Amino acid sequence: MTTEKARTRGRPRRFDPEQAVATAQRLFHARGYDAVSVADITDALGINPPSFYAAFGNKTGLFARVLDHYAVTGAIPLTDILRPDRPVAECLVNVLEDAARRYAAHPDATGCLALEGIHANDPEVSEAARAANDAAEELVRSYIAARHPGEADSLTDFVCTTLAGLSAKARLGHSAERLLATARLAGLAIAQTLPSEQPAVS
């Protein structure tokens, strides 16, 4: 006997590509790129594979769309936090604290999607995630270099290494409180590295 539920699942429905990207983002973030199959995605969206391939080309193409969506909806808002009218050390600590909160905000989707995507087995996906991460790293470096050129490289490495560690620990189940404690401890090192400063004149 065929149930009503079975008939509904077997009938493809029209879908909103942007909503589909948001749904895929949650899947990739929760399980990691490699663990999510096209079947998982089409099942979650309630569409058939031909509709999926027509909309996104392949899973790699969908992940590229997801990264763009994540940059707007889930990534650390670096351009808002790294303010020229505030001390550099203060803003860098705010970046780390924002990351700690975001990485632990959703128990089923912890860590940074871009940082974790670098470890994907698909070379194209890994490269796309790395490019997104490199762009964020360059933004941090440019911000520091504007007032502390001598410390820009080493401090950027420190901040980005701390972010990677926060992401990894979030994936292992560290709470927001533990991540924030780590972020604030790192902030003490940043404050000691940079001399006392006045905000830049905008």
Image (spheres, rainbow, N blue to C red):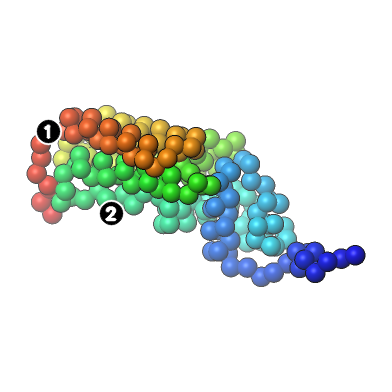
Q: Amino acid at mark 2?
A: Asp
Could you tell me which residue is drawn at 40 percent across and 33 percent down?
Answer: 165
Could you tell me which residue is drawn at 50 percent across and 46 percent down?
Answer: 107
User: Crowding near pointer 1: few (<14 within 10 Å), some, many (20+)?
Assistant: few
The image position of residue 169, as x and y in percent, is 44, 34
Q: Secondary structure at mark 1?
A: loop
The image position of residue 45, as x and y in percent, is 65, 61
Position of residue 7 relative to residue 131, above or below, is below
Answer yes or no: is residue 11 visible: no
Position of residue 132 relative to residue 5, above or below, is above
Which corner quadrant of the image does residue 89 belong to?
top left
The N terminus lies in quadrant: bottom right
Which residue is under mark 2?
80
Horizontal side of 72 relative to 8 (left or right) equals left
Which residue is under mark 1?
195
Which corner quadrant of the image does residue 50 belong to?
bottom right
Q: Secondary structure at mark 2?
A: helix
The numbered dot on residue 67 is none
Seen from the viewer's position, the closer of residues 55 and 90 is 90
Horizontal side of 16 relative to 37 (left or right) equals left
The image position of residue 145, as x and y in percent, is 21, 39
Q: Residue furthest right?
A: 1
